[in-house]
Amino acid sequence: MYENKRVLLIAGGGTLGTHVANELLSQGATVEIICPEEKHSDCERQIFHRDYASEKLLKELFAKKHYDGIVNFIHYEDPEDYKAIHPLLIENTDHLIFLSSYRIYADVQHPITEAAPRLTEVVKDENFLRNEKYAVPKARCEDYLRNERKGDPFTIVRPVISFSERRFDLLMYSGDRILQAARTGEVLLMPETVKDFTAGLDWAGNSGRLIANLLFKKEALGETFTIYSGHGLTWGEIASLYERITGVKFRWCPEREYLDSGAADLFCVAREWQWIYDRKYNRDIDASRVLKVTGLSAKDLTSIEDGIRYELQKYNEGHQ
C-alpha cells in the first residue's frame, strides 16, 4: 500500500516510533529514523540516523531527498521551539503528523470525542496554565497549527498512554514497578476513586498501527484524532489483568490513603498535576473517528490482555 513512499520519523527510536515504523515497513514504505540510540536493521528499507534532530541535520537530509510523510515525536515544552521548526518540516513533506496527547482533554465530555473541551479552555488555575510542561504546551502547539498554519498538510494525533516492555503502566505506576512488586510479593495500593473509570491506556502496537495508517489519507489532512483502539477497559479491569498475568497483588483503598502512602509518587508538582488533571479523570474515549479514517476496527487491533502478555514475554527475554 505504501510502496514508493518515504517516511521520516523524527525522534522515532522509542517504543511508539518502533511500532509506527514496523507498520509502515509491513506496507512497503521506506522508513528513515532519527534517534540518538545505536540501532540497526536487517531491512534495507529501514535506515537509522544516529543523531539528535537538529535543524542542521534536518536541512542536510532535506537537501538530499523529499519525504512523502514525516512523523514528529518530539515533545516541545516551549511551543516557540516548535513554531521555529514547523515551516522547515512542512516545506519538505506532503503529510506531517504532529504528536499531541490525550492528556489535553478536560473532564467535561463523556465519551470523549476530538471536539471535547481541552484543559486550556476549562482550567482556571493560572499556575498550571503557565507552568505545566506537557499537556499545556501540546495544546498551545495545536493552537498554532490550527490558527496560524491552517491549510498546511498536517494531522494532529492525541495518543493515550502506550504501554510496552519499557513501561508497564497502571495509573501512576510505570516502568517495571509492577513486575518488581510481583517478584517481591509487595502489595500495591490502588485508589477506589478510579476503579470503575475507563483508563486512557492502550498497547503501543495498536497506537503505532493507527498512526501509521493515518498517513497519506486525504480525510486526515488538517484533522485531529485521538489514538485509541476503543477497547475501553477500566483501571479495575486492567489491574485484574496484571494480577492474573504477572501475579502482582493490589489492594483497593480510599484515595486519601493511597496519596498519603506515597504510592502515587507525587514527589513534584508535575506528578501532582498528572494525577489531578489526568489520571483521576474518566477517560471514556470514542474511537470511532480514527477507526473510520484508518479503515481499522477494534477486532483488527490487539486486546490489552494480549498486549500485556506480548510485552511481558519480550521483557523476560531481554532480562534472561
Image: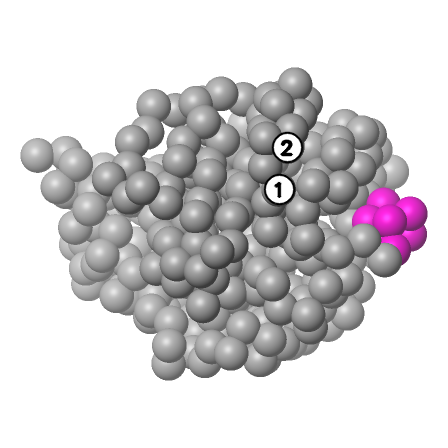
Question: Which numbered dot is residue 66?
Answer: 1
Say which residue label 2 marks.
Answer: 62
* Amino acid at the residue labelled 2: Phe
Query: x%, y% of residue 145?
Result: 82, 49
Query: x%, y% of residue 212?
Result: 50, 59
Q: Is there a contact, CB below 8 Å, between mark 1 and mark 2?
A: yes
* Observer-nearest of 194 and 261: 194
The quadrant of the picture occupied by the N terminus is bottom left
* Residue situated furthest right in the rendering: 148
Say few, some or many: other residues with alpha carbon within 10 Å of mark 2 (under 14 / 14 to 19 / 20 or more).
Answer: some
Residue plotted at (59% across, 31% down): 64
Colour convention:
one colour
Say few, some or many: other residues with alpha carbon within 10 Å of mark 1 (under 14 / 14 to 19 / 20 or more).
Answer: some
Residue plotted at (66% across, 25% down): 59
* Amino acid at the residue labelled 1: His
Query: x%, y% of residue 49?
Result: 45, 27
The quadrant of the picture occupied by the C terminus is top left
Q: How many marks?
A: 2
Residue 63 among magenta residues: no
Residue plotted at (39% across, 58% down): 28
- Report if residue 191 is visible in the image: no
In the displayed structure, 252 sits above or below 17; it is below
In the displayed structure, 95 sits above or below 72; it is below
Residue plotted at (12% across, 41% down): 317
Q: Magenta segment range?
A: 143-150
Q: Secondary structure at mark 2?
A: helix
In the displayed structure, 203 sits above or below 112; it is above
Taking the image as shown, residue 22 lies to the left or right of residue 249, namely right
Residue 145 among magenta residues: yes
* Observer-nearest of 204 and 83: 83
* Magenta residues, dominant SS class: helix
